[in-house]
């Protein structure tokens, strides 16, 4: 009579440990190294300038969340992990891995985040945590100031170094876009198909100008660049293919086309250019790229409309442009795109010179 031999606990532990080491080795060996050159631009850029205007379910709760993967300021690049629980900060001389949350926005040591409906600011250098407000939602944070809405009626501006220094601006409608450039706070509100553009002095927060713009199209990828309100319309002709970039001249009220392109995916701007990736793709169990002349990474001059192809590579989840470099972010999935995309190895980041 044969007696089955049982594996000893030691052998089982060794098998489990070996499997774990193989998994760790797979992640380490297949993770692409990020090597960034120093960027001398001293401005602030956010790859998604709406801030926490969307909601995500996390641990059974609804959180306002920031959809930006990248934030840049004064030579430092903050890059979020796809799972939103950690991030990397690339300084000019080092890289730092930090813990984060699904709702946070962080510049260097200062982090602003939502928790249980309240808004907090935390200094990780001093370990000081301060509550800014209740029932509020982050709209903008650039390291110097925090902008958030209360009851969707008031826009509150708080000095990041002194939370008692705060200003309030009343608004009507839904805030569609916020940015700060050239010493001007730009706020766009939306009410049906009417868009109102308010510009304030960032020192006094007194209103400098007000514009109105109406369109029957759904606007996407908005930005205020110099004297233009720029946006993309994907529903003018064919929502799945053609994207029309339009520019509304704030001084003259003239609307003109900045660019026309098919299969536009990710979009970003700097002070004079539009950058976007375009990919024609198809789904057949997994998502694959279909060869097309529109595919690639593109640059458009806002004033002249001149379009230039920067790269044949076209699969990117987020873009951020300074005056010197274009940062291209792609989620590194554990499996091919389209298959169990909740599992990640991390991200792939490329830096492309543009100046």
Image (cartoon, helix red, strand yellow):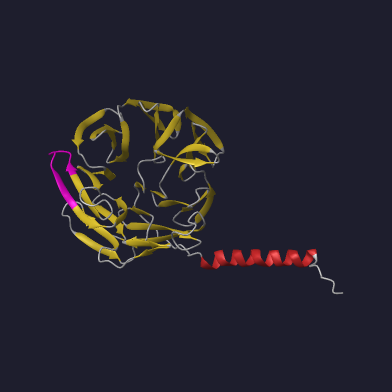
Q: Which quadrant holds residue 350?
A: bottom left
Instruction: List x then y, in percent, for residue 103.
Output: 47, 41
Residue 145 visible to an observer of this rendering: no
Q: Residue at x 30, y 68 (%)?
A: 291
Q: Give the camera-side residue of 27 and 210.
A: 27
* Magenta segment: 248-258
Q: Is residue 284 above or below residue 72?
A: below
In the shown orientation, is residue 124 left or right of residue 307? Answer: right
Q: Name the outermost residue toward the right.
A: 1
The quadrant in which the N terminus is found is bottom right
In the image, taking residue 18 as reference, residue 298 lies left or right, namely: left
Number of marks: 0
Nearest the camera: 192 or 30?
192
Residue farthest to the front, as pictured: 1
Whether residue 231 is visible here, answered yes or no, is: yes
Residue at image coords 55%, 35%? 128
Query: Residue 170, how many percent across, how many down?
Result: 32, 25
Q: Is residue 344 magenta?
A: no
Whether residue 115 is situated above or below residue 256 in the rendered picture: above
Report x, y in % for residue 233: 24, 47
Q: Quadrant of the C terminus?
A: bottom left
Of 149 and 11, nearer the camera is 11
255 magenta-colored? yes
């Amino acid at each position: 009579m044969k007696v089955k031999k049982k594996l000893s606990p030691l052998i089982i532990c060794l098998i489990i440990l070996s499997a774990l080491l193989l998994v760790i080795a797979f992640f380490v060996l297949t993770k692409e190294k990020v090597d960034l050159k120093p960027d001398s631009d001293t401005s602030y850029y956010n790859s998604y300038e709406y801030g926490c205007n969307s909601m995500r379910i996390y641990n059974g709760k609804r959180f306002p969340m920031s959809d930006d993967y990248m934030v840049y300021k004064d030579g430092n690049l903050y890059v979020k992990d796809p799972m939103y629980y950690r991030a990397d900060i690339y300084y000019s001389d080092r890289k730092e891995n930090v813990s984060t949350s699904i709702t946070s926005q962080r510049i260097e040591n200062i982090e602003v985040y939502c928790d249980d409906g309240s808004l907090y600011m935390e200094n990780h250098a001093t370990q000081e945590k301060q509550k800014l407000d209740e029932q509020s939602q982050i709209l903008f944070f650039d390291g110097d100031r925090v902008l958030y809405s209360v009851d969707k009626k008031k826009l509150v501006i708080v000095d990041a170094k002194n939370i008692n220094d705060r200003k309030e601006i009343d608004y009507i409608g839904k805030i569609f876009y916020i940015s700060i450039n050239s010493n001007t706070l730009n706020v766009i509100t939306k009410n049906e198909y009417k868009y109102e553009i308010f510009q304030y002095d960032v020192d006094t927060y007194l209103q400098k100008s007000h514009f109105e713009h109406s369109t029957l199209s759904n606007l996407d990828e908005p930005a205020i660049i110099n004297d233009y309100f720029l946006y993309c319309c994907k529903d003018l002709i064919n929502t799945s293919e053609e994207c029309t970039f339009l520019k509304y001249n704030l001084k003259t009220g003239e609307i003109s086309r900045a660019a026309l392109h098919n299969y536009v995916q990710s979009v970003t701007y700097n002070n004079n250019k539009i950058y976007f990736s375009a990919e024609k793709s198809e789904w057949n169990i997994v998502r694959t790229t279909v060869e097309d002349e529109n595919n690639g990474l593109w640059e458009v001059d806002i004033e002249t409309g001149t379009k230039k192809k920067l790269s044949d590579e076209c699969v990117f989840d987020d873009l951020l442009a300074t005056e010197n470099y274009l940062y291209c972010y792609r989620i590194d999935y554990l499996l091919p795109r389209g298959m169990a995309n909740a599992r990640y190895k991390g991200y792939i980041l490329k830096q492309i010179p543009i100046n």
